[in-house]
Image (cartoon, rainbow, N blue to C red):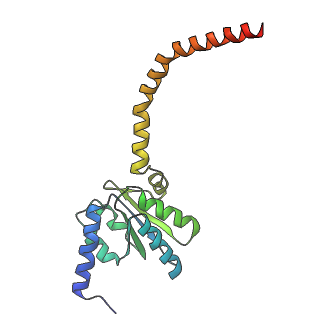
Amino acid sequence: MPLTLADKKAVVAEVAEIAEQAQSAVAAEYRGLSVGAMTRLRVQAREADVYLRVVRNTLARRALEGTDFACMRDGLIGPLVLAFSRSEPSAAARVMRSFAKDNEKLAIRLVAFGGELLDPSAVERLASLPTRDEALAKLMALMKAPIEKLVRTIAEPHTRLVRTVAAVRDQKQAA
């Protein structure tokens, strides 16, 4: 059953709203995927907080107009599934990359991040970006390292003294 004008407007508004909030987007050609495979992809996307939608290209072009993902408009050709990362910049790329490894029929065509259209091979780089928690953990480790080194340096003379006294004690006991 074809979409009515009201339905088309609702789809455009929904995708535009998601695109406004999204941090990155990936478009992949799903031609040849079974319904079961698409369902698995949708489940993985839902678990990673990725908005996944199959939209007619003309409606997608209208929805992406005026967003950071307007650069994708010219590449919207063929049957595409759009994935938008809502919480983590790398979430959509991570989901699509992992699913494409298991299913050769899913071909990544467009990758957009920060208002720029990237090469489809950039999905590897984008997917390897750390999550927010990983980035915070790395930052905290970096901030904590100088303090730990200072504490170890300050404690070293005492430790060396204790080791020397213990060595002298062991030497006297052995004699």
Work out whether residue 170 or residue 65 is closer to the camera in this orientation and state it. Answer: 170
| Residue 92 occupies quadrant | bottom left
Single out the residue that lies furthest toward the right.
175
Q: Is residue 53 visible?
A: yes
Tell me residue 51's x, y (percent): 36, 68
Q: From the viewer's perspective, is 89 left or right of 43? A: left
User: What residue do we see at 45% from left, 27% from top?
Assistant: 148
User: What residue do we see at 44% from left, 56% from top?
Assistant: 119
User: What residue do we see at 46% from left, 57% from top?
Assistant: 123
Tell me residue 70's x, y (percent): 29, 63
User: What residue do we see at 74% from left, 10% from top?
Assistant: 173
Tell me residue 145's x, y (percent): 45, 29
Work out whether residue 158 or residue 22 is closer to the camera in this orientation and state it. Answer: 158
Position above or below: 58 against 134 = below
Tell me residue 2's x, y (percent): 32, 90
Screen quadrant of the N terminus = bottom left
Q: Is residue 78 visible?
A: no
Q: From the viewer's perspective, is 14 left or right of 44? A: left
Position above or below: 89 against 7 = above
Position above or below: 56 against 64 = below
Screen quadrant of the C terminus = top right
